[in-house]
Amino acid sequence: MSTILLLHVALSLVGIATGLVVALAMLASRPFPGWTAVFLATTVLTSVTGYFLPADRILPSHIVGAISLVLLALALVALYKNRLAGPWRWVYVSTAVAALYLNVFVLVFQAFLKVPALHALAPTQSEPAFKLAQGLVLLAFIAIGVLAVRRFHPTEHARTLRAAG
């Protein structure tokens, strides 16, 4: 396995793990600035390093990477430039959750390619097992996104902490 591929996979796994922590924090309306920075940085780097992997043509993974980078750019602007003010709160939440979903989508895709038991269930990735897995992931992220948009109000959380302290 090449160094760039190892780096790409490591960044992706860190991005997914930290992204799940950030998504759960959003559901509890808790800002986790450190975890969020790691999630956003590693997810951006995952998409960028994907373009350095060998390919002789544009692949679906390149398109997913481009979409992810656009989503992440919006999330970064919403969070760091506009400080989640007004509509930027839901822009941040929805784009961050969507970028995390795309990373998990690719993880499931790769799992069905590389894990022998999963590959046996869906060798062409058009079989019901693959479609079911991806459908369940999509539904889970839609639910997470909707709930996070409704629940994530970090300014209210900060006010509550100040009042309690």
Image (cartoon, rainbow, N blue to C red):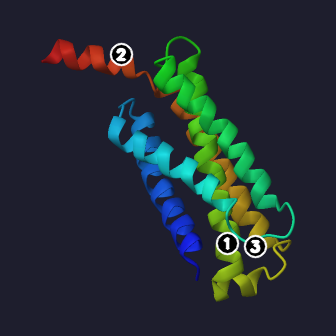
Q: Inspect the image, locate mark 1, and give the three-letter code of the amino acid beneath it.
A: Gln
Q: Residue at x 79, y 52 (%)?
A: 63
Q: Earlier in the sequence, mark 1 or mark 2?
A: 1
* Relative to 154, residue 64 above or below: below
Q: Give residue 120's position: percent from left, percent from top.
A: 74, 87
Q: Image quadrant of residue 109?
A: bottom right
Name the image quarter holding the C terminus: top left
Q: Is residue 161 left or right of residue 49?
A: left
* Relative to 107, residue 101 above or below: above
Q: CA distance from mark 1 to mark 2?
A: 39 Å
Mark 2 and mark 3 in contact (Cβ < 8 Å)? Answer: no
Mark 2 and mark 1 in contact (Cβ < 8 Å)? Answer: no
Q: Earlier in the sequence, mark 1 or mark 3?
A: 1
Q: Residue at x 63, y 83 (%)?
A: 115
Q: Inspect the image, locate mark 3, and give the three-letter code of the amino acid beneath it.
A: Ala
Q: Residue at x 49, y 26 (%)?
A: 79
Per the rendering, the mark at residue 110 is 1
Q: Is residue 36 left or right of residue 149?
A: left
Per the rendering, the mark at residue 129 is 3
Mark 3 or 2, closer to the camera: 2
Per the rendering, the mark at residue 66 is none
Q: CA distance from mark 1 to mark 3?
A: 14 Å
Mark 1 or 3, closer to the camera: 1
Per the rendering, the mark at residue 156 is 2
Density class for disc 3 (Cα within 10 Å; few <14, some 14-19, many ≥20) is some
